[in-house]
Amino acid sequence: MPAKSKNAFQRPKSWTDAAPQLVDVATGRAAADLVIRNGRWVNVHSGEVIAATDIAIVAGRFAYCGPNAGHAIGKGTKVVDAGGRYLVPGLCDAHMHVESGMVTVTEFCRAVIPHGTTSMFIDPHEIANVLGLDGVRLMHDEALAMPINVHVQMPSCVPSAPGLENAGAQLTAADVAEAMKWPNIIGLGEVMNFPGVAANDETMVAEIAATVKAGKTVGGHYASRDLGLAFHGYVAGGPEDDHEGTCVEDAVARVRQGMKAMLRLGSAWYDVASQIKAVTEQGLDPRSFILCTDDSHSGTLVDDGHMDRVVRHAIAQGLAPVTAIQMATINTAQHFRLEREIGSIAPGRLADFLIVSDLAELKIDEVYARGVRLAKGGRLEADIPPYDYLASAKKTVKLGRKLKAADFDVEAPEGANEVRARVIGVIENQAPTRALEADLPVEQGIVRMDRRNDVCQIALVERHRGTGGVTNGFVSGFGYMADCALASTVAHDSHHMIVVGTSKQDMAKAANRLGEVGGGVVLYSQGKEIALVEMPIAGLMSDERAEVVAAKAAKLTEAMRAAGCTLNNAYMQHSLLALVVIPELRISDVGIIDVTKFEKVDLFV
């Protein structure tokens, strides 16, 4: 399933091919393409800020970093005066999912380049759950066409929890071994099946072995609070990092076992402040800590930033600016065995750097990648054309029938006037949920919601094979006061459709609307469509520009607030309610899932 690009940016020469040019420029025998003069060099290798530094660039790589690069200036050399500003390595996002931005790889890059991101390590397991290996190849090939470094991790768990959900596709150990031969696969994506690793599941063992044999990095995802033998078995099984920690004890435990603790600040995951205390208060070595975003939607990217936002937040928690920058540059590069390519301003590395006027605030004036200025003053200068996805990547939402309000009825046990039901409890700004219980009334054999106590309905609608299946349950935490429903075909990780609402009529209308447009997210209230973000590519990504998507997402957020939802970034919380690899309680096409036990449970207690 190849995709088409109107224009691919030229890939830089390899270090070995460029080495003679680099040596000639460094020694003054040849002229550089670009020289930046009079900068303050943020040296992430030594931890210093070195004043009065020049850097010389040729063939998209740094050739010379030191005082007075006059020897590298010739007739064709472009010279830029940094005016005493800071020269900072381009920022790296160590773990993220492009699909969470609601946009394509191209549009994600357009949004984040002005914020200083020049390297991303993406795990496309969202599109893999819909389109399988073809979907991974789509994003792999698109990533190669970008003017910045977009490295791809091969998804490890599709579906994420076999037996507890049915995705739109399945990836095998043979698929993983095959993908390790692709030019832009950097490692294995987050290994979410942590019970499988601890139990020596054959598929997990084979996938990790294929990755290690290829000399690539194994990504981790240990979403359990249990730091006992199950955790030790998981670490022994090979994962080298983890971004699922939420408290300082999690960070300490991972680092002590030789893992890298990835601390995330996404649109709705705020896990840096609690865990960075392992460095600021307990004195652990910061080289074992890496910053990332995991999930950021388009509104956050366009309005608030990307890795620059994460670095500023880490500095605000008490980290020294250079240390925070190390966690978003050299630490990431070393973890993925790319320290000779990215992550620092040093000879031989790709010339990815920022000109920054305020280090503590990380005020980014200019962004360069491979020696070319891509953004200035927060505005993208590079012309990055849209990337064409073929029709085979669209029309993936198959409901099989038109849904009715009655499809969302929850039938009570015969003769019951009241039931005690399991309720998924949303935790603001965190990925885990709580396993709650609530006493709910029964009228004419149907269990009713309890809107006064913030218990509304949730449904998962099968959308890959058109079975017409609907799984119903209850959720608390959104605070909806109006008659409304929010439906989304972004439902990590199997990406069926999740519908949450206080009105079954609106739930049916919202679900049917997404079937009509080929996927996305929509809010209905009192029978009317209030906000819609169309995402026709695999039901996960828009084919519009990032700015357009961000504006639509902002309207969606306003509509949710108007309906009574006060959660920060509630859409992101909504999208994770089917993630059956993060405790405690979730919903899938199989039923209600207790993720502490990894088993299906009855809706009623």
Image (spheres, grey):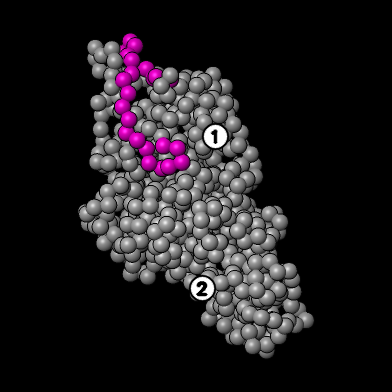
Q: Where is 547 relative to 186, above or below?
A: above
- Residue 45, which numbered label? 2
Q: Secondary structure at mark 1?
A: helix
Front residue of 291/517: it is 291
User: In the drawing, does residue 319 fall left or right of residue 463?
Assistant: right
List the single residue furthest toward the front. Answer: 281
Residue 190 x/y as whole percent: 38, 55
Dot 2 and dot 1 residues touching (CB under 8 Å): no
List the single residue furthest toward the top. Answer: 444
Residue denoted by label 1 = 517
| Crowd class of label 2 (few under 14; some 14 to 19; many from 20; radius 10 Å) | few
Q: Residue at x 62, y 78 (%)?
A: 65
- Residue 287 shows in the view: yes
Q: Residue at x 37, y 17 (%)?
A: 448
Quarter of image, res 325: bottom right
Say if the magenta span includes residue 445: yes
Q: Secondary structure at mark 2?
A: loop
Q: Residue at x 40, y 24 (%)?
A: 455
